[in-house]
Image (spheres, rainbow, N blue to C red):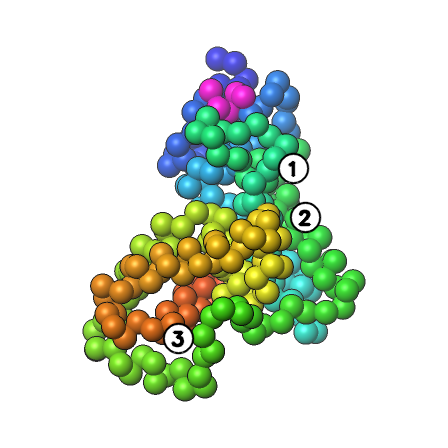
């Protein structure tokens, strides 16, 4: 068994649900001898948009990276929230990487594919997120928290009144429809909507982080909102106006941004 095959089988044992071929891994290694070959496997699979690999990257980022940066003082004294820092880092990692050849299906790989296994993926993600925190700290300004979507309807102060029109017992159906809509979006669309509706970034600023050209941003947001509307309409019916649609989307991305209520993992040495 060659070294590459050994690395591949070790990585498959560590992450058995990731579906990535030995052939693709061999191509990704490019004859190098990485210090952390299993981590190179994970980063390469995520770079080629393998969904389970991205779940693992998201788990590392939203739990371990967030905990590590919080332990170093990020998010204090009015600076940007640590979860926001990770969301921006994730948006950069998920955008198209033009320096790498297209995937067999014609799609561009994600930027995270440039990770070469010289450190653990956890360390790499920490470095990426720390740089964003450092730059924000140097600028001395936190991101605005209000949602700024020029073509969205204004939200009223009586947010509870919009939910009063819904029949009791619909929460589970709405949650299922929102989940189905979210999973239908591409990773780049998820990241864009998270930055706009979850972090409150301006559309063009969020689009730049995801790697979209200015004329693509509004189209992508409109498409994302239409996906949510299509899934929610059969559940909510005629009550699904622009205000309620926007509120439900903001609630979803605020929940994702907050993350599950789990204990923080210690930083690995």
Of 158 and 127, the residue lying toward us: 158
Contact check, label 1 and label 2, Cβ < 8 Å? yes
Q: Give the mark nearer the N terminus: 3 vs 1.
A: 1
Structural crowding at the residue carrying mark 3, measured as other residues with C-alpha within 10 Å and reported as few (<14), some (14–19) or many (≥20): some
Q: Is any atom of residue 86 visible in this view?
A: no
Q: CA distance from mark 3 to mark 1?
A: 46 Å
Whether residues under marks 3 and 1 lie with C-beta atoms below 8 angstroms apart, the answer is no
Which segment did they paint magenta?
A: 23-27
Q: Residue at x 50, y 25 (%)?
A: 25
Q: Is residue 218 above or below residue 80?
A: above
Q: Name the foreground residue: 72 vs 268.
A: 72
**Distance from Cα at disc 2 to Cα at disc 3:** 39 Å
Q: Residue at x 42, y 56 (%)?
A: 224
Mark closest to the chain's N terminus, 2 or 3: 2
**132 lies above or below 100:** below
Q: How many numbered tags mark residues here? A: 3
Instruction: Answer left or right for 205 relative to 173.
Output: right
Q: Is residue 25 magenta?
A: yes
Whether residue 22 sits left or right of residue 94 in the image: it is: left
Q: Residues within 10 Å of mark 1 (few under 14, many from 20)?
A: some
Label 1: which secondary element: loop
For the residues labelled 1 and 2, the Cα–Cα distance comes to 10 Å
Q: Position of residue 211 (x, y in %)?
A: 59, 47
Q: Which of the 4 image quarters holds residue 39?
A: top right
Question: Vertical placement of 264 versus 3: above or below?
Answer: below
Q: Residue tagged by mark 2?
A: 127
């Amino acid at each position: 068994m060659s070294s590459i095959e050994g690395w591949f089988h070790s990585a498959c044992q560590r992450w058995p649900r990731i579906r990535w071929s030995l052939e693709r891994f061999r191509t990704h290694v490019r004859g190098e001898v990485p210090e952390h070959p299993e981590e190179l496997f994970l980063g390469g699979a995520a770079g080629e948009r393998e969904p389970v690999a991205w779940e693992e990257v998201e788990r590392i980022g939203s739990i371990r990276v967030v905990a590590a940066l919080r332990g170093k003082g990020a998010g204090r004294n009015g600076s940007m929230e640590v979860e926001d820092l990770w969301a921006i880092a994730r948006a950069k990692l998920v955008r198209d990487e033009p320096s790498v050849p297209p995937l067999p299906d014609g799609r561009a790989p994600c930027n995270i594919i440039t990770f070469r296994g010289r450190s653990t993926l956890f360390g790499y993600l920490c470095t990426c997120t720390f740089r964003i925190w450092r730059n924000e700290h140097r600028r001395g300004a936190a991101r605005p928290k209000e949602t700024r979507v020029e073509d969205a309807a204004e939200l009223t102060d009586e947010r509870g009144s919009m939910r009063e029109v819904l029949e009791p017992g619909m929460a589970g159906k709405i949650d299922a429809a929102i989940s189905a809509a979210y999973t239908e979006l591409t990773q780049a669309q998820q990241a864009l909507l998270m930055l706009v509706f979850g972090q409150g970034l301006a559309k063009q600023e969020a689009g730049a982080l995801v790697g979209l050209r200015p004329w693509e941003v509004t189209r992508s947001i409109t498409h994302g909102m239409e996906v949510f509307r299509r899934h929610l309409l059969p559940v909510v019916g005629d009550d699904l106006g622009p205000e309620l649609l926007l509120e439900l989307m903001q609630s979803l991305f605020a929940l994702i941004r907050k993350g599950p209520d789990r204990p923080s993992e210690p930083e690995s040495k």
